[in-house]
Amino acid sequence: MGCFTFAKCVMVVVSLLIFVAGASMVAIGTWVHIDGGSFIKILVPFMTNYIRHANVPVFFICLGSVMVLLGILGCCGAKKESKFLLIMFFSIIMIIFISEVAAGVIILVYSRDAKDFLSSWALPGLMTYGKEEVFTDLWNSTMISFRCCGFNNYTDFSESYFYEQNGLLYPPTCCRTPAGYPCVEETALFSHVVGCYKKIVSLVQRNIILVSAIAIGIAGIEMAAIAMAIYLYCYLDDKAT
Ligand SMILES: *[C@@H]1O[C@H](CO)[C@@H](O)[C@H](O)[C@H]1NC(C)=O
Ligand SMILES: *[C@@H]1O[C@H](CO)[C@@H](O)[C@H](O)[C@H]1NC(C)=O
């Protein structure tokens, strides 16, 4: 078997895998979107609050659709030896790859300013906690999942809509008291519930190896796909002339 035939086979198999993964994501996303997540509820109880948001399934559906498209382009491009389809496949993966690298660089370069940036977005928003449902729900999910309170600490909720509407109480996650007990300022102070920013940052730091491994793995697969598309294209180009 020649090099070209081998590369063609690998390309077809990899594209089929991408296609199947993408199609599954579309299917699960659609199911959750329609069904409201009763299936996910069984699998990952703590994620139910996130999954309930319309955006998460829609994100899955979009990502899955792009993967389905890539799978079809790669598979047909290799099987039919079509330079046009290979170019399309190459362009889409290249765009994704460049955006990921750009996002990675921005995160690395600006990670020191991340806290200021995020707090300038989160703190004013917390004032409307209890008023805007989507935002409140997002914070509820985050605080319950990560067992944290506010951005820095419970004081972020002082002067919030929730605080004023509920007779100067903080959200229940800000106190380590049995459910039903009111979360007043004193209890919140003594509970020392960590702010969500600190909690999430330390979670990422503790799992930094896993996070990097996933990032490197994804980048590796993309580079391999890019290299393969270039190889097939050049081979077909040579053959044509
Ligand atoms: C968020 O949590 C608070 C406190 O438990 C609750 O009163 C509120 O109804 C919840 N809001 C949403 C949108 O889930
Ligand atoms: C809450 O966080 C703010 C901002 O980081 C800080 O100034 C304040 O001292 C903290 N309060 C308590 C009670 O931890």
Image (cartoon, rainbow, N blue to C red):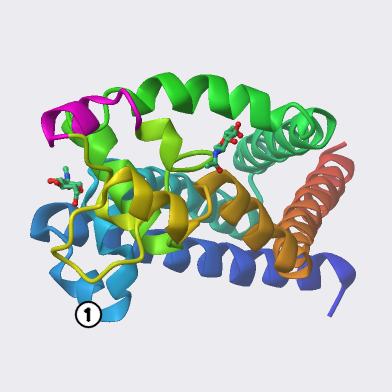
Is residue 29 found inside the magenta-colored segment of the image?
no
**Residue 75 vertical position relative to residue 107 in the rendered view, above or below:** below
Cβ(mark 1) to ligand 1 < 8 Å? Answer: no
Which of the two residues, 219 or 238, is positioned nearer the viewer here?
219
Q: Position of residue 158 (x, y in %)?
A: 35, 29
Q: Is residue 39 visible?
A: yes
Q: Position of residue 149 (x, y in %)?
A: 42, 49
Neighbourhood count class around disc 1 (C-alpha, 10 Å): few under 14, some 14–19, many 20 upward: few
Which of the two residues, 135 or 76, is positioned nearer the viewer here?
135
Query: What amino acid type is highlighted by mark number 1?
Result: Ile
Q: Residue at x 32, y 56 (%)?
A: 173
Which of the two residues, 200 or 209, is positioned nearer the viewer here?
200
- The quarter of the picture where residue 115 lies is top right
Is residue 160 found inside the magenta-colored segment of the image?
yes
Magenta segment: 158-167
- Asked whether, in this view, residue 120 is left or right of residue 51, the answer is right
Q: Is residue 80 visible?
A: no
- The quarter of the picture where residue 129 lies is top left
Residue holding disc 1: 42
- Asked whether, in this view, residue 181 is left or right of residue 185, the answer is left
Furthest-front residue in view?
186
- Asked whether, in this view, residue 112 is left or right of residue 185, the answer is right
Task: Please count the marks in the image.
Answer: 1
Q: Position of residue 25 (x, y in %)?
A: 37, 60
Q: Position of residue 68 (x, y in %)?
A: 44, 53
Q: Residue at x 43, y 62 (%)?
A: 147
